[in-house]
Amino acid sequence: MKKHYLITPGPTPIPPEVSAKEGLPILHHRTSEFGTIFLEVLENLKYVFQTKNDVLLLTASGTGSMEASAANLVSPGETAIVASTGNFGDRWAKLLDTYGAKVVLLREIDGQSVDIAKVQDALRKNPDAKAVFTQHTETSTGVVNDIKTLGSIISQSNALLVVDAISGLVGQELRMDDWKVDVVVTGSQKGLMTAPGLSFTSLSPRAWAAVEASKSPRFYFDYRRMKKALADKGTPFTPGVTLIVALAEALRQIRQEGLENVWARHTWLANATRAGVKAMGLTLFAKTPCDVLTSITVPAGIEGKKIVKRMREEHGVSIAGGQGELVGKIVRLAHMGYMDRFDIITALSSLEMILSDMGAKIELGKGVGAAQQLLVKGPAGTR
Ligand SMILES: *Cc1c(COP(=O)(O)O)cnc(C)c1O
């Protein structure tokens, strides 16, 4: 018998009420039955994005919304600043390069967050820059970026602020309108507690002007086409109806808990995870750790890839290793979406057992105990 525990930073586990919706008969997308659910989803998406702008729904994984944004916002030959803090930031640079943009890449060392002064400097040196592309939470390293400050600075320039919040949205505070963010993209399989396959983009009026002006080629991912269909309360092509019906349920649950309470739950789980990791004698990898995952430096002499493999194969516990340059050097535990205190206990306990068995200097129970101390009470002293 093997029981599975999905503790990766995407995809994430989904509530049973959400998976149950996926078994319902398929609805045709041009019916009033589906239309009602679709409109409810669009309204609730505005709530989780904290925006009055429309949210576009794309049937694609999160990268689909990233690619669509690169194509719809920047014309070939125009300058785009990329403030990258890791693998997903680098993806912005690759996508923009693919669409012929002139990319100014500001790349932080892995584990560091965006340096605001460097962005200010790049804006001064590139007054014609169309946009600054960055991440809310950089999932490859586990850092959070200061989007609020970036928004206050970039909104005073001619450039747009485009934020990949694929892992951060819902899990960590992000207020699109109040923080003056022009474009936010996310996906269904992380904080939104739904299966992979949908992505979302919301655009400010300033960003819509860029969409109209963009000369990049696009068809399926043309935001203008999506906007037109949205005016008729639909999508230009067949959307992932099954996923949308499931997402409607996930969004209801988020609304019921309340977005600020969801953020507080993630902070609570993040604090307990970090305390557990430190009590085990391990080091946090991120200098400014986000609330949706914890990245941990693999102790010297231990093979990082083996930790992940053994936790999965022997305990059924899936966590993530490092990506790119960080393969084997870090491991990543998620506390994102449909997660509670026992997901943290499970992950830390499995990590302790495997590390101890691999010969690391680990005292069993120390990390778990430290996490438990912070998990006796619920978020902000509740439960
Ligand atoms: C998961 C993730 C992506 C990629 O999303 P896909 O759904 O795999 O296409 C991009 N950016 C960030 C920050 C992510 O966490």
Image (cartoon, grey):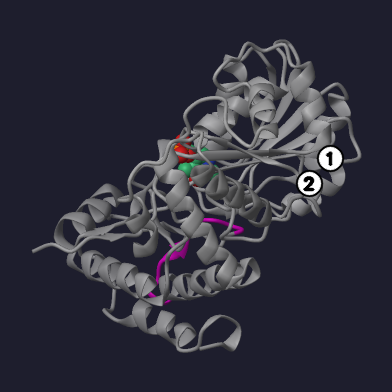
- Say few, some or many: other residues with alpha carbon within 10 Å of mark 2 (under 14 / 14 to 19 / 20 or more): many
Q: Is residue 15 visible?
A: no
Labels 2 and 1 touching (C-beta < 8 A): yes
* Residue sitting at x 57%, y 50%: 41
Residue 12 shown left or right of residue 337 in the figure: left
* Residue sitting at x 59%, y 65%: 255
Q: Main secondary structure of the magenta part?
A: loop
Q: Closest to the observer: 43 or 289?
A: 43
For numbered disc 2, what is the local secondary structure?
helix
The residue beneath circle 1 is: 154
Q: Is residue 257 visible?
A: yes
Q: Name the quadrant of the N terminus.
A: bottom left
For numbered disc 1, what is the local secondary structure?
helix
285 part of magenta stretch: yes
- Say few, some or many: other residues with alpha carbon within 10 Å of mark 1 (under 14 / 14 to 19 / 20 or more): many
Residue closest to the far front: 32
Task: Give x and y (percent) for residue 114.
Answer: 68, 45
Residue closest to the far left: 1
Residue 356 shown left or right of residue 208 in the figure: left
Asked which quadrant contains residue 67, the reply is top right
Task: Give x and y (percent) for residue 52.
Answer: 77, 49
Residue 150: give its label: 2
Query: In this picture, which residue range is highlighted in magenta?
Result: 279-288
* Residue sitting at x 56%, y 60%: 171
